[in-house]
Image: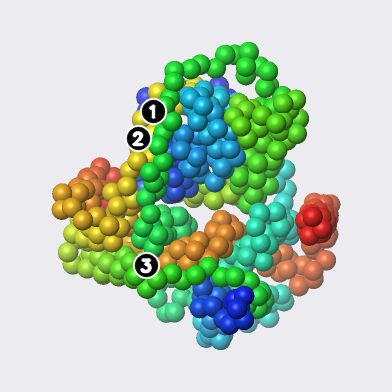
Amino acid sequence: MSRHAGGGFDRPGFRLLTTGLLLAAALGAIAVLDQQIEVFGFGDIGPDARSFPRVVLWLLAAVLALRLILNLRSPDTPLGSPVRLGRVLAVLACTAAALWLMPRFGFFIGAAGAGIVVALVLGEKRPLPMILPVLIAAIVAYGGRHGLGIPLP
Amino acid sequence: MLQDAFLELLNLWVLVAALVGIVAGIIIGAIPGLGPTMAIALLIPVTFTMEPIPAIILLLGVYQGAIFGGSISAVLLNLPGTPSSAATAIDGFAMARRGEGGRALRFALYASVFGNIFSCLVLMALAEPLARFALDFGPAEMAMLMFFALLVIVLFGGGSKLDALIMVLVGTCASIVGLDPISGTPRFTFGTFDFENGFQLIPVLIGLFAMSEVLLQAFNREPLVGDATVPPLQSSAVRLIELWRMRVTLLVSSVIGTFVGILPGIGSTVPAFMSYNLARSRAKDADQFGMGAPEGVAAPEAANNAVTGGALVPTLALGIPGDAVTAVILGAFMLHGLAPGPFLFRDHGLEVYAIFEALLLSSIPTVILGLLFFRVAIHVTRIQPRHLLPAIAILAIFGAFSVNNSLFDVWVMLGAGVLGFLFRRAGFPVPPLLIGLILGAPFEQSLRQALLTSGGGYGIFVGSPITIGLVALIVLSLTISLILGRRKART
């Protein structure tokens, strides 16, 4: 949150959200560091597999904490209306669904579906231009499989 | 070597690759928001089945074409296709408004080619000696060099140093995931095999630059170009004498672009504006700058194209990318078995020199295709996001999958897309993250190898003339940054 001219606090913005998320991730990684990195000591002198990650994560957490404090004094990028964020979430949800379904229904169906949802989210209203993502997905699927020899799902 | 490398270029596929790359680059670069980084990242899968030389030439053609393409929308619509074209827009758009858009684009094209040729010659002259010198580097020297590169990105990358530091550290943290470079212990793999290879560069790149653009457009939902009208393009020509009169500007701008390009993380925007300001301060008719001075177009264009060759010097000789685009090119080199670094010239000298010569010779088709295609590219800028971005989303999914034929990489791409969206909305710079990701693992490896060699003693980092020189450079960089910061605070 940043203090606005009127003396109150604005809604948290993108900077605060991103910094907060990164700080939470860095602290989480520090908390699970010993579990996630096993060290087998053979009497080596010098840093082990945990040393570098520990230093970098603590440094990152410290720098993010400083950024968070400085953010409180400076104006933030507004999060925008729920509708705008909803559009981003819709693209993410449809892409995630397409990836999840791809092993079962194949690349073409998944990619074309994701492309159509992206077009709709970006404001496409006419049915005819919806053919475009389908066409592109078909070209990419055919070209990838037969031209480049990539075993697409 | 040079002659053998030239013979490698006498191949139809090399010519086709260069031409296709340049045309694709001009068209993609002209679309605001789609820079060379995204274009190259999405086109890498197309090159999988190609031989290394035509594959890299195609991608470098896209790079060259896209930088000129970026100046088309900058000059005609006042909408820079790439950030480095913002300086070109100042005088270019002023020229276009008085009906000299075609002339401005010709100046931009010729200056681009001049900058490119100059920087290619510097690249050919410097890269191999630098790589040969780097063959003497041990782990301590490599660790200090990479630390210096990361420090330069933080100190001189532009914008907030704290934000750049955060991004470098985020990239370095991401590089930790996978197997430990010394002991092979899994780190932050959460018990899955997929994480053992760590985050692959290409899916992360595609996510950060392509998928995040889709998400940003879904958030903003604004036309790329809006209702801006293209000023009429009258047929015009640029005479040789006009270019001769600005020879010093072209040369100085190319020198700035090349040598700033060699410094990691600065990119092409800073040298473009530096050259513009220098050209204005040197000009007899400085008051014409901003009102449509041809030198105001030529100076930034020569500089931002000269960055290409400059940025490739540390990328190819040391494996340290100069900016986001060269990070993508580094990824492409690695995918084709040409691992950048000191051994590149020793093991693949023929291929590398063939690529250098192609980069130099491609100036000729760049001029021809630039003149032919800038009118076509104007229409491309009119493409609506709702038509373009579904294609980018599909290509992003395909590109991420095709690197290892793995859906896991596509999930990584999507995750990187979300992070890219958040970082770009929040104003955090993305290129330092990328360079942190690339340099993080080799930096840790060199650091630990050096400490293992010295038995844990830190004296090894000041134990040779090379490391002492690098420490001196680090101290010098910190001092310069401090002085510049104080001067900025005063003004």
Q: Look at the picture and state if B451 lies above or below A132.
A: below
Name the chain under label 1.
Answer: B
Question: Which amino acid does the dot numbered 3 rest on?
Answer: Arg
Q: Quadrant of residue B298?
A: top right
Q: Look at the picture and state if A105 lies above or below B295.
A: below
Q: Residue at 76% of width from left, 73% of height from top?
A: B456
Q: Residues within 10 Å of mark 1 (few under 14, many from 20)?
A: few
Residue marked by disc 2: B379
Residue marked by disc 3: A84
**Marks 2,1: beta carbons within 8 A:** yes
Helix, strand or loop under label 3: helix
Question: Which amino acid does the dot numbered 2 rest on?
Answer: His
Image location (x, y in percent) of residue B71? 50, 36
Image location (x, y in percent) of residue B382? 35, 41
Name the chain under label 2.
Answer: B
Q: Residue furthest front?
A: A6
Q: Please name whichever residue, B296 or A148, is drawn nearer the observer in this view of the structure.
A: B296
- State whether discs 1 and 3 lie on one chain: no
Image location (x, y in percent) of residue B371? 44, 23
Q: Residues within 10 Å of mark 2 (few under 14, many from 20)?
A: few
Q: Please name whichever residue, B263 or B384, is drawn nearer the observer in this view of the structure.
A: B384
Res. B341 visible in picture: no
Q: Please name whichever residue, A26 or B484, is drawn nearer the observer in this view of the structure.
A: B484
* Image position of B171 (left or right of B471): left
**Marks 1,3: beta carbons within 8 A:** no
Question: Which amino acid does the dot numbered 1 rest on?
Answer: Arg
Helix, strand or loop under label 2: helix
Helix, strand or loop under label 1: helix
Dividing the image into 4 quarters, which one contains the N terminus of chain B? top right
Q: Residues within 10 Å of mark 3 (few under 14, many from 20)?
A: some
